[in-house]
Image (cartoon, rainbow, N blue to C red):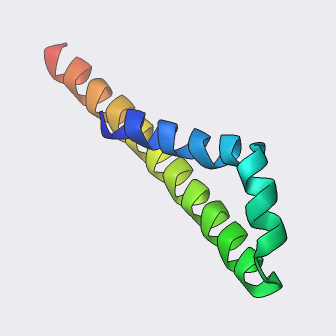
Amino acid sequence: MFVVILRIMILFPILFYFTPAFDIINQELDFVWKIFLYGFLILFELWAIIVIVRDTQLRKQFKAEQNAEED
């Protein structure tokens, strides 16, 4: 469930980039705030991707261990 929420949270900033509201915000913000906003969104997306990949690897490892115990 946590991974599903993270996947949705990755898509939200990507969709946010293409909305008209983002153009309005982009015009109003100073350069420093734009760097902060873009940097935060990129770091957040990278963190979420890392968590999803790690969770997937742990699930595969756990299933492999369970299959090895059954054999």
Which of the 4 image quarters holds residue 61?
Answer: top left
Q: Looking at the image, can residue 12 be seen?
A: yes
Which of the 4 image quarters holds residue 4?
Answer: top left
Answer above or below: position of 67 versus 6.
above
Which residue is at a point 73% across and 64% down the rendered structure image?
25
Q: Quadrant of the C terminus?
A: top left
The picture places residue 57, in percent across and down from the top left corner, at 43, 39
Q: Nearer the viewer, residue 10 or 69?
A: 10
Which residue is at a point 39% across and 38% down the rendered structure image?
5
Answer above or below: position of 36 versus 5.
below
Which residue is at a point 55% across and 61% down the rendered structure image?
44
Q: Nearer the viewer, residue 27 or 59?
A: 27
Q: Looking at the image, can residue 17 be seen?
A: no
Q: Quadrant of the N terminus?
A: top left
Answer above or below: position of 37 versus 53.
below
Q: Give left or right: position of 18 versus 59.
A: right
The picture places residue 53, in percent across and down from the top left corner, at 50, 43
